[in-house]
Amino acid sequence: MRAALLVALLLQAAANAAIAQTYSSASPVPRTTSLPALQALAIRREIEERFTIGLEAETRGDWKPAASEFERIVALRPAEPQGSTAHYDLAIAYANLQRNDDAARELRAALALDPGFLAAMANLISVDLARGDAVEARSIADRYVMLAPDSARALYSRGIVALRSGDDATARADFGKLLHANPSYALAHYDLALAEERLGRYDAAETELRAALTLAPSYARARFALGVVLLREGNHAAARDAFARAMQDAAGDPALANIAAAMRDSIKR
Amino acid sequence: MMGVVSRTQLLRVLAAVLLAGSAFFCGRIAVAGASSLDDLLAGALTPSAAPSLLAPITSAGRVGWECKPEKAAAAASSSKAALPPDPSPP
């Protein structure tokens, strides 16, 4: 009986050893020997490497080498999302090299590959404003607000485009909506006040400017605008005080300080 | 004699031209000053700056929580949207 048990245990031990037997590690087996497949793998590797190098260059502010890396990636025509992303990153390098027309072209290419790319829309509007293309800026801003109606950046961007192109009603609506969600953003109060002033709604403009100045008391541009609105309302003494204060607060903006001083001096006591 | 006359005439013509130019220039300023105070003020009331560019994106693309620029582009909060900051106290 004992002998039989011993034999059984030995057989079990031998079986376990066979199952658990290990082999020395072999070199990795290539997954493919196909030349096109190997070439595709090499290109994918190159794209990843160039992304890493290009992003590091952009972090350092080395825009020219960054542009070279992303130009090469774009030439390799990577699949999504790398295709649209490479165009987007290349646009940032171009914009910082003051090549705004090229930056706009790359952002359009990014949006052609990925029509819902909000960051590309945001950047294209800023680039278009820098290059003076109000028509494209407005078209992209409309699309941006349609896709992301609650986005603060979409509302702000379209509001600025609208103010610059004289569409005061749209600017009023966009900054009003932006402020509904962000009542403590002083710049939006100022821009809403500009729209109200242009629409002849001086009471509303004054309210917005006073809100901006409550949030940011040294906001010289808002103080100057308040002076203008008070002047339009016929409140000359208060307007004069506002221009005087704007002149003091605009120490870092000589052009604004000069015009504030001129306005202050033009109002008789 | 001829040379002196020519020089005198030339100086007179030059003075007349300068006077006419000055009058024209001053007149333009006066007209502008009288009629375009509104334009002057409107020109000073400039909208805020455009937002600066959103940051670069990695090869992973815009989809996913790691992509801060795309999140900023969609954020409802102005503090998370990379918008121009409010003026700070001097």
Image (spheres, coloured by chain):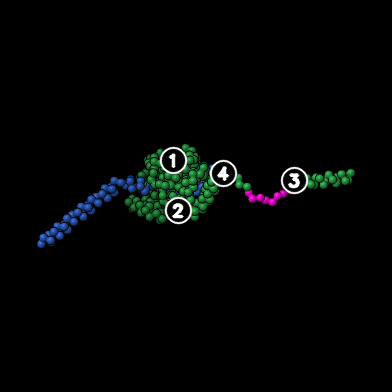
Residue kind at label 3, given as amino acid type: Ile
Confirm whether circles 4 and 1 share one chain.
Answer: yes
Query: Which chain corresponds to the colour green?
Result: A
Q: Nearer the viewer, residue B66 or A186?
A: B66
Task: Residue A156: name its quadrant.
Answer: top left
Residue occupied by mark 1: A140
Q: Sequence-wise, which precedes: disc 3 or disc 2?
A: 3
A127 with respect to A29 (left or right):
left
Chain identifier of the residue bearing label 4 in the image: A
Residue occupied by mark 4: A34
Count of numbered badges drawn on the protein: 4
Q: Are marks 3 and 2 in contact (CB under 8 Å)?
A: no
The residue positioned 39% from the left and 44% from the top of the image is: A133
Residue occupied by mark 2: A64
- Label 1's element? helix
Where residue A130 appears, x then y in whole percent? Answer: 40, 47
Q: Is residue B85 magenta?
A: no
The residue positioned 39% from the left and 43% from the top of the image is: A134
Residue occupied by mark 3: A19
Q: Nearer the viewer, residue B35 or A132?
A: A132
Query: Which chain corresponds to the colour blue?
Result: B
Residue kind at label 2, given as amino acid type: Lys
Residue kind at label 4, given as amino acid type: Ser
Where residue A78 appears, x then y in whole percent? Answer: 51, 44
The reply to whether residue A121 is in sight is no
Magenta residue span: A20-28
Q: Sequence-wise, which precedes: disc 4 or disc 2?
A: 4
